[in-house]
Every structure is written in C-alpha cells, then in structure tokens.
Amino acid sequence: MKKVALVFVLAVFLPSLVLAWLAVRSLRDQQFVLERQQSLLYQSLADSVAKEAASLLAEHQREFARQVEAMLGENKATEVADSFDRRLRRDWRLADVGFAVSLDGQVYSPNVFDGTEAWRFRLENEKFLCSRESVQVYWNSPKGPINLSLADDPKAQNDAASGAQLPAANNPTLSGGAGKLSKDQKLLRNVEPQQVQQAMDNQAYSKVAPSEAEFRQLIGDSTEGTVARFLQNKLNLMFWYRSPRDPQLVFGALINLPHLAEALQRVVKIDTALLSDEICVALLDDHARPRAQTTLFETDWKHPFVATEIGEALPHWEVAVYLLNPARLSQSARTLKLTLGLLIAVLVLAIGVGGWLIVADLNRQLTLARQKTDFVSNVSHELKTPLTSIRMFSELLADGRVLEKEKQRSYLNIITAETARLTRLINNVLDFSRLERGEKKYNFAKCDLAGVVQETVETYRPHLEANGFKLECAPPESPLSVNGDRDALAQIVVNLLSNAEKYSNDRKEVRVETRRQSQPLPHVEVRVLDRGFGVPQGCEEKIFEQFYRAHDSLSSGIQGSGLGLTLARQIARAHGGDVVCQPREGGGSCFTLRLPAAPISTTN
Ligand code: ADP
C-alpha cells in the first residue's frame, strides 16, 4: 500500500505540482505577454499607416515633378526657372515657395522682391542651395541617376514627367552603369564617396538621422528627392526635381506643412471597427502635436503606446497609437491571471482529490482482497469445527458406547446445535451470494414482528441457556405489524443473537426488546442487547461492511465470516429499514433493527 502511495506521489502528484508551479510562474508575466501581443498588433498598424503616409508623400513628389514638366512644356528651361516661384505658388497649393537653381550656383527663383516669404527663403537657403555651405539635412532621393542622353529624347521626357521609375540612386552598381556623366557630375563623383557613405551609414542606423551635406552632394546624379532641415526649430521640407531636358537646373518647392498635414489626414484611419473602440491613431508633428487623429481624445501625446516615424521626408513626424483605456490592459491581464490561476488550482485540486480517491479505492480493494482470503479460511474453519463435533458425537452414539440417557440427550443436543450453526453459516453464505448477484427474493407479507422475534428467541433459547446465558425477552403489549418476509426477518434476529452469544465474555446476559416508536416516523424496533466486549470505538459502521471483522479470529479466537451484519443490514434496508449499532450503557453493545410500521388496516 505504501508502495502504491509512493508511486502515485512520485509519478503523478509531484510532476503535476511542478507543472502547476511552472504555470503559476508563467502567470506572473501575463501582463507583459499581453502588452507585447498588443504592441506587436498596434505596431504593425502604425507601420502600415506610416507607410501609407510615406507613399502619399511620394505621390505628391511625383505630382510636383509633373507640375515642373508641365511648366517646361515647349518653353525654354531658364525662362521657366525665372518665373518658377510665382507660377508654382499659383498652380500648386502645397507650395509655399518655388525655387530654381543651377548646379553651378545661380539662383533663378524666387526673386527677393516677390514678397517677404521669397525674401526670407533666399536669406535662409541661398547659400545652401548654391552649395556654398554644408548644413544638417534629412534627405532622400528615391530616383536616379539622371540619364543625360534622354535630354534630346521627347518620349523619355514624357516618361520622366509621368513619374516612370528609374533605377535606384543609392545603388552604386546601377549608378556606375548610368552612361555619360557631365563634367560636374564626374567631379561630384570624385568628392562624394566618404560623405555620401557616411550619410548612408547614418541612414542604416536611424531612419531619420540628419547628415551634414551640401545641396549638390545630396542631389548627386538623382532626378528628384526631398530635403528637410530645421531652421529656428521649425521644419522646412523641400521637394526638388531635375528635368532630363536640362539637368543643370534644379526646380524645387518649399512645402506648406499645414496643407500637407491636411492631405495626410486621409491615411490616418483604423480599418478594423473592433480596434477603433480601443485605440486612437494620430499623426504627430515634430513637436508631438497631433495633426490628425482617428478619435477625439485628449492625452499626453508625448507618450504613445507605440509609434512609427514616417521617414526622412518628414523627420520627427510620427504615426502614434494610443490606448483609449490604458487600464483595460492591466484589467484583462488581471482577469486572465485570475482565470488561469483558478484553473490551475482546480486542476491541482482535481489531481489531488482524484489521486486520493484512487489510493483510497486501492486501499479498499486491498483490504477487501485480504478480507476475502480471511473469509475463506474462516468459513472453512467454521465448517470444520461443527462437523468435527457432529462426527465425533454421532460416532459415539452409533457405536453404542454411551449408555446413559442423560449423556445421550446432551450429545444429541450438541449435534442439533452444531447442525443449526452449520445451517446458519451456509444460509448466510448462500444469501450473501444471492444478494450480491441481485437474486435474493423476498416474500413480502403483512406480519407481526413481535411474533417473529418471540418465535426465533424461543428457538434459540435452549442453545443459549445451555451455554449459561440468561436470556430475557419482553413481549410488547400489542402486535407490531410490519410488511416483510418472515424468514428474512428471523434471519436478522438469529444473526444478532448469535453475535451476542459469540462476543460475550463472563457476563452472559442477553436481552431482546421489541417496541413501537412514533418519532421521527412511526416505526417498530427490535433491540438485541448484550454485556459482552462491545464494538471497538470507530468500528460502529465498518462492522456492517462485507467480510469486516473487528474481532479478528486469530487474536480473539472467535470464529466468524464477517457476513452476518452485512446480511442483516441488507435485508433490513430491502424492507425500508436499517440495523444500527450503539454501545450499551454499563458495557456491551446494543444492535437495533428498525422497520417501518405497516399502515393500520381500516377494514370493518
Ligand atoms: P462475524 O461472523 O465476524 O461475527 P458479523 O458481520 O456478524 O461477522 O460481525 C462483524 C463484526 O462485528 C464481528 O467480527 C465483530 O467484531 C463485531 N460484532 C458483531 N456483533 C457484535 C457484538 N454483539 N458485540 C461486539 N462486537 C460485535
């Protein structure tokens, strides 16, 4: 048994405790896991909105190139360059200022006398655009290199105007194979590598790292791009474009940021309706001010849940995601933790209880197996003892060696008693097996329980008195009517009397009482009381289990099968009653058979 318990603890209980401990440990990280899952989800949303914003910017950039090509039309490039600022501002609402510079540092547009904005633009940007100073810029030039051979090809010009893709500017292999280069460009090629490489390295580490460069350097041999720089803490975003018709001229526009932000509003959206109850997506400018947002909502805009930068074209502008109810995350983490915790507790409890039940059942089965073995040896012994006496006394009588009448009667009495004992034992065993198989049949009929008890006691009296017992049986004043099987009820009384005899010591007193009781329901009782050893404490219920013996044959020397009380109780229960055991005041035990009283017949 101990071995089974040990195996269970080692094979089932300990591993499940370890698993539960691991599960509880993993619960501690639930909030982190949830946050991580949500941040991954929202990060991908922010990324896609930022990507859309970047492609919208690229779209505007292409539109700018188209504007320039449209203005150039059949006109001479330098003429267009002279009036570029005025015409661009008139035709394109995203432009604050339009500029046209040549690569050798001549500014065509804007004219300083065309208003304060033009004047300020020249003041702030002229040196940079003319490549006379290096400044900190964020730049990108997605298209290039320019193919100078296209300058005279009208079809190629059209392609350029419609935004047809050219090979990547930053790809050195493609740049290298780009055909003829102008003298200036060759010169640029010679001075560029370290600085351009540095700028490209910066880009690799941070998408929006600024780098120090001259305008000509960052133009390189590309056809178009963006340049952003901060002047007095204010972002200046410029688009620039070189037409294949006159690559020496660079046309550009200082972008009106409020108008651009307005245009970007349409990409700031949440596609999934479910998410719009949980988050707000906002477009933040370089001062972390919301320029567009999906939900009207106020928060500390500087601390988004996740954010993605738009890129070099709009440095420090971000698409940010905010949780509308930040407490919900910890709430759901708490709920999840609680649910999983409860689940683990229930599982461990179930394993514990299940294990305990299995061990208890195993224990019961082992005890039963042991009791069955004891039963076989007990029954064999019980059969052998009366058989020996019967054989011995009947041989003596048969041989005619006992002549005294008194002795002959005594021997015959012994033979009768032993035969009765054998019959009782065999009846018990047979009845038990019938009950076990569910084959036991009762002949229910209305009968007087007091009469049945009286008859049984009187049959048993000679045997008890012959063994020195004082037997009292007080008959009730009136019959005790029950609905039952007379023989089965008599068997209960015989078993109880037989036990009273077996488990008595020096005080050989047996008393049988029959009475009517009205509480809690009308019923009748038969009590068999003795002054014997008494039932050991704690065994009052166990003695009714099959094969259970509180007084072991080996230690007490009292023979028995452990079936008498089991049968008594089963028969009583089949009659709607029960047999119970109580200690008797003054020593000994009291066994009570209770049966429901039969309804009194009202026949006249
Ligand atoms: P058994 O054949 O062993 O007597 P029973 O089912 O009749 O089987 O009784 C079960 C056990 O109950 C007995 O082994 C004994 O220990 C205990 N018992 C029964 N009757 C008495 C009694 N009158 N006094 C003390 N113990 C009793």
Image (cartoon, rainbow, N blue to C red):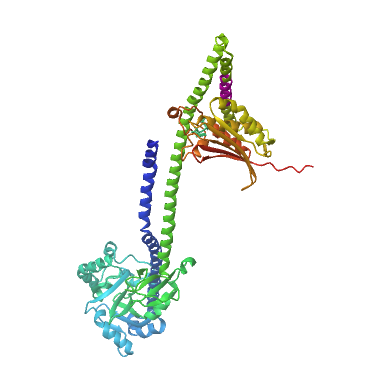
Range drawn in magenta: 414-426
* Rendering coords of residue 225 (x, y %): 32, 72
Q: What's the magenta bit mostly, secondary-structure-wise?
A: helix
Q: Nearer the viewer, residue 275 or 432?
A: 432
Please, is residue 223 above or below residue 560 in the view?
A: below
Please, is residue 200 above or below residue 238 in the view?
A: above
Q: Nearer the viewer, residue 449 or 99?
A: 449
Q: Could you tell me which residue is drawn at 36 percent across and 69 percent down?
A: 307
Q: Could you tell me which residue is drawn at 42 percent across and 58 percent down?
A: 338
Q: Nearer the viewer, residue 450 or 559?
A: 450
Please, is residue 466 above or below residue 362 in the view?
A: above
Is residue 151 within the magenta segment?
no
In what quadrant of the picture does the N terminus appear? top left
Camera sees residue 62: no
* Rendering coords of residue 535 (x, y %): 48, 37
Looking at the image, the residue that sits furthest to the right is 604
* Rendering coords of residue 479 (x, y %): 68, 38
Camera sees residue 77: yes
Q: Nearer the viewer, residue 360 or 286?
A: 360
Is residue 416 within the magenta segment?
yes
Q: How many marks?
A: 0
Q: Is residue 301 left or right of residue 550?
A: left
Q: Is residue 292 left or right of residue 419?
A: left
In what quadrant of the picture does the C terminus appear? top right
* Rendering coords of residue 257 (x, y %): 37, 79
